[in-house]
Amino acid sequence: MKKSNTPPKRVLVKTWGCQMNVYDSERMSDILHPLGFEDTDNAEDADLVVLNTCHIREKAAEKIYSELGRLRKIKAERQANGLQTKIAVVGCVAQAEGAEILKRAPVVDLVLGPQSYHKLPEMLSGLETGGSDSARTVLATDFDVDEKFKQLPKKRVATGPTAFLTVQEGCDKFCTFCVVPYTRGAEHSRTTDEITAEARALVTSGVREITLLGQNVNAWAAAAPTGVDETWGLAQLLGHLSKIDGLDRLRYTTSHPRDMDAQLIAAHGSLPKLMPYLHLPVQSGSNRILQAMNRQHTIEEYFSKITDIRRTRPDIALSGDFIVGFPGETDQDFEDTLHCIREVGYASAYSFKYSPRPGTPGAGLDDQVPEPIKSERLQRLQALVWEQQLAFNQAQIGKMLPVLFERVGRHAGQLGGRSAYLQSVYVQAAPELIGQIVDVQIISASNNALSGQLVSA
Ligand code: 5AD
Ligand code: SF4
């Protein structure tokens, strides 16, 4: 039988939710690898399972409990064979429902909020020495983002030619539908020096494209590099990172329309490495609903930002997020949202039925919209977006687009990459081209991908 103090060696990290969760999961692996953990995709082999969770909509949160049901059986089977399995729930569900998880799912050993995952090694060794029950501690209330980034390993090893880099976390906007200000805490920007060092390390290990991440990334504001006595905004940070040799492409997400200032818009015209793609969620096209959502801007202000952005970078691909069925949304409010989509013309968009989240002001509002109406509106909205996506992709047919190859495709001899507009592009090409930016002649398009051929082929 395995000795109780033998450290676990295989870890399965499962990720739900946004790109920041993907980043957080990679950083957790960075912490665990030096402790002797190797990654596995298989729960049956895992000594440690980390579930990195999302609380943004009810559906996302529910998935965790069904996953825990599955893991309970695997843990029991492994135990029957003398093997221990530790289960950690981390991320936003952990933050919002920490105590409830421990009550509802005794199979869970650890619960860590998104600002506490750097404590994973400490918590694991607590489990080893204190026995499983005494170490079941909820760390969900810690919001010390500075401390987290200080504790994380400085060196990052890239897993491919593209990488996410968190520059800002948390949110002070308090949209009335959203849990993020409660699960991720207040806005916090990492320093220019810290971000630059991480970007350089990524480029040294082969990364050519970096996407800067933040819940409100364009609210990023921090001290300029050491020696420069200024406070910088995102436009200056992008300009600074553009100077890194070997880094070819920069992106950022997610932005709030209110923080889309003139400097940042101008950066889209002056920084060649900044890709012509912008995710700028509006959520609704109705001023009445925008106000009820506490979005802090009107639809006219949003349109005016879009006009400025398009004037600066005419070929920019725009993407957005939409919520249908926010409490009180009438047929006319919904028509206003469709009007917004027709006016802007999106290259892609994400859309969701409103999901009341416990503790947010929206959940307590009268006039919740019935489920069948939400479903019907979502379907109509998605059909319109689908048409626009297809039109945007088809407009690339016949063009030559630079593509950064990222991975092998599903079919033999195929590579997958991204255009500057973030479209997936598939080409028959040799795997040696992964990590290179190569001109591709686009020959066909669907609503979610392009295919093409190498010019020299
Ligand atoms: N219900 C539905 N969608 C939501 N989003 C955030 N909170 C909710 C909610 N309660 C959507 C928003 C946001 C995206 C990340 O998720 O559109 O921009
Ligand atoms: Fe949520 Fe609104 Fe903050 Fe975005 S801006 S994270 S939607 S509260």
Image (cartoon, grey):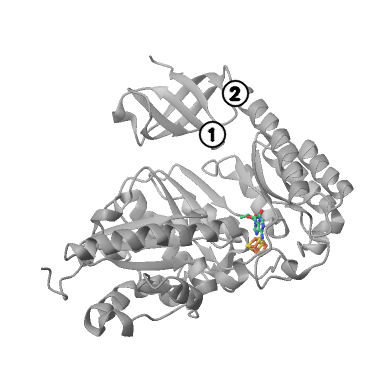
- Label 1 neighbourhood size at 10 Å, few (<14), some (14-19), many (20+)? many
Could you give the CA–CA distance between mark 2 and mark 1, rounded to whole angstroms? 10 Å
The residue closer to the viewer here, 310 or 29, is: 29
Q: Is residue 235 above or below residue 345?
A: below
Q: What x and y, as percent, mark residue 147? A: 42, 77
Q: Residue furthest top?
A: 457
Q: Residue at x 22, y 82 (%)?
A: 129
Quadrant position of the N terminus in the picture: bottom left
Looking at the image, is mark 2 or mark 1 earlier in the sequence?
A: 2
Q: Amino acid at mark 1?
A: Gln
Residue 190 x/y as whole percent: 49, 68
Picture coordinates of residue 189, whole percent (x, y): 53, 68
Quadrant hosting residue 161: top left
Using the image as rendered, state which of residue 347 and residue 64 is in the foreground: 64
Element under disc 1? loop
Mark 2 lies within 8 Å of ligand 1 (Cβ measured)? no
Picture quarter with the C terminus = top left
Residue 108 position by quadrant: bottom left
Query: Badge 2 is on which residue?
Result: 396
Q: Which mark is residue 423?
A: 1
Is there a contact, CB below 8 Å, between mark 2 and mark 1?
A: yes
